[in-house]
Image (cartoon, grey):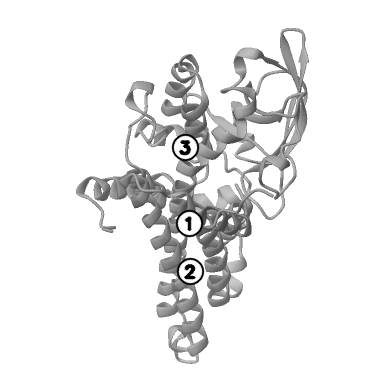
């Protein structure tokens, strides 16, 4: 296994790092997270012009057709911000759902606009809070003549406020799970942002929203299978974003321990501070190496299902714990919302349960490694 970056990947890394520094300096980022202004559509479209939306989409549909690691390198730098906006939800996850399940006509109609940033499509998947899995989909599709009516509430939709359209998971009258494409301007859609200790999350309610039969992505009963296939490719990119966030927290915390003086010496000389930095480093390294091993496996065509679940569990837990240990070092200054650490803390809590908690993915990893016979 060779995790060294190629010359092209090094170029991607530098361009992305320069973009974050120029377009989203820390004083702006802290204001965005403080004021819950995390949609940042203009910023997202600037990034889309660089080809960062739909990076893994084939060129025939307007994408860049890059490798998993190419995309991961870019998202690692975006995570160092942490850059807000629908970079992952629309540019990666929604694009891959369409690529995996849509008809050829739908791919041609939808993917080019997603890749260019013209269209922002956000998946609205589960209804039951932090729960994940097909059983958490409760929104209903009821036939009404030659179309359908969509009813239900998606309680935690990541980047839901930024969406121009949704890919909504719902159940048909016979209980099958379907994915349908819904324009946000359709009557009956209500979006309410959440303002707790989380970022970029909204409740999206569908009240008798009319959906055409042509809006189905794939067959009605194939909804969760399509989603699972897309997640196997998308989740490692989200993990790379979290790795970048962990690296940024480590770098700024290590610098703080060298410059902050207490009792006549840098605080980095104190044993307890060193302990926190070691714990922080352990979680960073675990997230980095399991994520990039997963990206390498996928690029090499090796079986990667177990590694994908492992990466999501380790990266989400790692981001959460890195923030905790950094707070122990920074103490009071790190709890100010104008401090960059608070933006990371809010986002780490949000991404911890997004697309399944670490506990869920550890179970899924074991199911892949040690399959159980159906009883």
Q: Secondary structure at mark 2?
A: helix
Q: Residues within 10 Å of mark 2 (few under 14, many from 20)?
A: many
Label 1 or label 2, whichever lies nearer to me, is 1
Q: Quadrant of residue 215?
A: top right
The residue drawn where x is 44% and y is 47% is 237
Residue 86 visible at all: no
Query: Counting other residues with Cα less than 10 Å from the Cα at mark 1, is it few (<14), some (14-19), or many (20 or more)?
Result: many
Q: Please name the residue that numbered disc 2 is placed on.
A: 283
Quadrant in the picture for residue 361: bottom right
Separation (CA) of disc 2 from disc 3:
25 Å
The structure residue drawn at horizontal position 52% and vertical position 64%, both measured from the top left corner, is 318
Camera-nearest residue between 194 and 64 = 64
Looking at the picture, does residue 80 appear above or below residue 177? below
The one nearer the camera, 200 or 34, is 200
Q: Position of residue 85 (x, y in %)?
A: 52, 40
CA neighbours of label 3 inside 10 A, class few (<14), some (14 to 19), many (20+): many
Q: Are marks 2 and 3 in contact (CB under 8 Å)?
A: no
Label 3: element kind = helix
Residue sitting at 45 percent across and 42 percent down? 233
Residue occupying the point 59% across, 60% down: 345
Q: Secondary structure at mark 1?
A: helix
| Of pointers 1 and 2, the one earlier in the residue sequence | 2
Q: What residue would you read off at disc 1?
A: 311
Q: Name the residue at the top extreme.
A: 146
Measured in 3D between alpha carbons, the distance from the residue under mark 1 to the one under mark 3, in whole angstroms, is 17 Å
The answer to which quarter of the image holds residue 149 is: top right
Is residue 158 toward the left or the right of residue 265 in the image? right
Mark earlier in primary sequence (1, 3): 3
Residue at numbered disc 3 = 92
């Amino acid at each position: 296994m060779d995790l060294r970056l190629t010359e092209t990947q090094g170029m991607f890394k530098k361009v992305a790092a320069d973009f974050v520094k120029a377009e989203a300096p820390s004083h702006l980022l802290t204001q965005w997270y403080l004021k819950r202004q995390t949609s940042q559509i203009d910023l997202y479209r600037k990034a889309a012009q660089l080809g960062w939306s739909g990076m893994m989409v084939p060129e025939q549909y307007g994408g860049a057709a890059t490798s998993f690691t190419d995309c991961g390198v870019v998202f690692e730098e975006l995570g160092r911000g942490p850059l807000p906006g629908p970079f992952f939800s629309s540019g990666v996850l929604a694009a891959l759902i369409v690529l995996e399940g849509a008809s050829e006509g739908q791919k041609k109609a939808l993917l080019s606009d997603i890749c260019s940033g013209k269209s922002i499509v956000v998946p609205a998947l589960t209804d039951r809070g932090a729960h994940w899995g097909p059983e958490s989909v409760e929104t209903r599709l009821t036939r009404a003549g030659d179309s359908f009516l969509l009813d239900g509430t998606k309680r935690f939709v990541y980047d839901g406020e930024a969406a121009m359209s949704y890919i909504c998971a719902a159940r048909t009258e016979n209980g099958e799970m379907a994915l349908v494409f819904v324009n946000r301007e359709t009557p009956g859609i209500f979006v309410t942002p959440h303002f707790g200790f989380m970022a970029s999350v909204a409740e999206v309610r569908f009240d008798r929203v009319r959906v055409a039969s042509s809006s189905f992505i794939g067959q009605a009963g194939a909804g969760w299978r399509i989603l699972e296939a897309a997640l196997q490719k998308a989740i490692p990119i989200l993990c790379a974003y979290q790795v970048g966030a962990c690296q940024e927290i480590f770098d700024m915390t290590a610098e703080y321990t060298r410059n902050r003086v207490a009792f006549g010496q840098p605080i980095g000389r104190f044993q307890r501070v060193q302990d926190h930095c070691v714990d922080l480093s352990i979680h960073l390294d675990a997230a980095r190496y399991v994520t990039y091993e997963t990206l390498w496996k996928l690029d090499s065509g090796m079986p990667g299902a177990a590694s994908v679940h492992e990466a999501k569990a380790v990266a989400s837990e790692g981001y959460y714990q890195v923030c905790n240990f950094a707070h122990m070092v920074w103490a009071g200054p790190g709890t100010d919302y104008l401090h960059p650490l608070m933006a990371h803390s809010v986002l780490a809590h949000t991404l911890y349960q997004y697309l399944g908690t670490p506990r869920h993915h550890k179970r899924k990893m074991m199911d892949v490694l040690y399959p159980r016979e159906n009883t």
